[in-house]
Image (cartoon, rainbow, N blue to C red):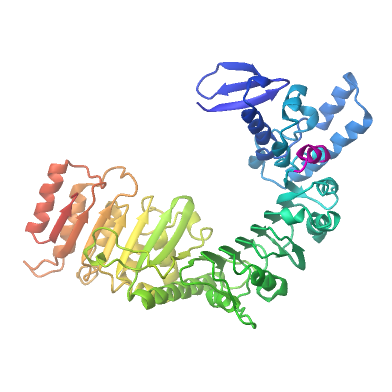
Amino acid sequence: MAVRVKHSGNECVLTSRRATVRDYLPFSQFPVEIQALIFSWAAVIDPPVTPLRPIAMLRARSQRNPIPAVDLEDYKAEFDGAHRLRNRLDPEAIKGSLGFIQISHVCQEWRAILLSMRQVWADSVGTLPLATADMVARAGSCPVTVTVSAYSSHNQEIDHIVEASAIRAIRGSLADDDDGDVDNLLWTSQDAIAGHPINALEAVDLFGNGYAHVRDDTVFASSLRYLSLQNVFVAFIVSSLQSLSIVYDETWYGDNGLGEKPAFLDMLRNCRLTLEEMKLFHCFGPEFMSSTDPINIPALRHLSVGGCSPILLESIRSCFTYPSTCDVDLHVIKDIWLDNNDVRKDRALQHALRAFSDEVVTRTGSYGLVFNTLPNDILSISVCPLSPDSSSGKGDLFVVHPDLGSRTVYLDAYSEAKYGADVFTALGYTLERGTDLSALRSARVLSVVRTTKLNDRHPHTFVHSVLAKMTELRVLHLHGVDNAMMSEVCRTEDDGKPFLPHLQVLRLSAEYPSEPRIRLSLFSASLEARAGRGQPKGQACTLPCLIVDQDVEFDESLETQRSKAAVYEELKWVEKVYWKQ
């Protein structure tokens, strides 16, 4: 049963989404673990975005029940801070927020129960601005997690936070376009606490919502394992880092120059033996090549890079190297500060596919492609080694090579998929602009994974134009099939010759429910058109193999389907049919 918890005084209201009945229970009747969760939800997950009540209401209440003027000013400071933050956020992002949660808002019974629960206080420091000092004291020797929301160097909470005996994590956003925010949050902490709490720091996750910060200063954090920075760069001197993410938004300058920053290179050198995951978006200029020897990172397991430079992979490899078993993702994303964005993206896609396919060929001798159009408009093309039995079209068409990690190119979802595009449409536009996607020509196997039907807003000719470039294609596996796709695959050319004449295997699987189900009559008509149209009488262009998996749904009974399958073989439309076996 889904339950919504509301706290009021010393009681909690449990509201079921399935019923209108409400049960009122004393807070003390909840298990201690549940009490801790409720507190964490209120103080951490529901951030201090909107005030609990408008300042005008607070003043009205103060006239009925006067409170000291100093308290009112404290409230006002909180509400002013919340108002500044609220103006920065989308209203939908704060809908239903509980607002500021203060010690004064928690009933005496609740406080008494939670006083000894140090971990609860340690995980909430920073989200309750006026209660920070009290919460640090409650946490005792427990390492604290500092959460800041639109932090500004004008705030004084950091003065209380640095009194903690140890800081385990720092996360949140910087409010102003001021480097002082970064200084005050990190370097002041380091100086004020004489180094001992920062030695316990394991995770840093910061978002700069002003202009892009790039700093050469360094912070010493010997225990840091996870570092995520967006629109801000802070170099840490650390030898144990395992995960590094540095992302600049497309709205910033494409050349943020990290590859030329000594502090960035020093950080990589110090953690090169432990670094396992790295993400770098818009971190290198369009023509960047390092002038120093590349840094070897032998433990790297997953590398994700993003930009629109045609030499992005070369730029990365000039800066550092990684083992062949590392999984590599390249995100082709625009940078509005650079001219000819479409041309740059096309060239970046062209070079990435060529580089990945050459790498797979060097290891295995051949390769196939996987076109993915997944939920949330995620478009990707994977370059994969082929299985020994891939030519049959049965079973697994691709294998995981022991000496080679995955190689995937992600397409710009903002410029392509937001219009309802799939991979065919994205590639079709690239081909129309004159880019030679040579990696398409040598692919022998293509697996198309779609979780939605072909969008009627885009011409299906993109399927034709892309597949026409794949002259070595022998096996086509469609995950997600409908009448429109079958019509494209089985069409004939203007001269009457069949499309994809060298195709050996057509395999169909259902990745999404067919609504309506595939019309068997149209399916049969597509195969008939491919076999007979434009051919001399009695000389059909036979498809060597058709495989239809169990999950493909048609509008006729299974008995009728199998009867039709026998006709395909009898009329030589298909040489061998494997129908739902």
**Foreground pick, 202 / 289:** 202
Instruction: Give the mark count.
Output: 0
Q: In the shown orientation, is residue 134 left or right of residue 563?
A: right
Q: Answer whether residue 79 is visible to the viewer in this image.
A: no
**Foreground pick, 138 / 525:** 138
What span is colored magenta in the figure?
A: 133-141
Q: In this view, does 117 lie above or below 554?
A: above
State the predominant SS element of the stretch in magenta.
helix
Q: Position of residue 293 (x, y in %)?
A: 62, 82
Residue plotted at (76% across, 24% down):
107
Q: In this view, does 39 lie above or below 23?
A: below
Q: In the shown orientation, is residue 521 left or right of residue 104?
A: left
Q: In this view, does 563 lie above or below 468?
A: above
Residue plotted at (38% across, 53% down):
456
Q: Position of residue 550 (x, y in %)?
A: 23, 47
Q: Answer whether residue 299 is visible to the viewer in this image.
A: yes
Among the 4 quarters of the image, the one containing residue 315: bottom right
Q: Is residue 569 magenta?
A: no
Q: Position of residue 458 (x, y in %)?
A: 40, 57
Q: Where is residue 139 in the image (x, y as percent from the top left)?
A: 76, 39
Residue plotted at (26% across, 65% down):
390
Q: In the shown orientation, is residue 450 left or right of residue 203?
A: left
Among the 4 quarters of the image, the one containing residue 66: top right
Q: Does the magenta stretch include residue 140?
A: yes
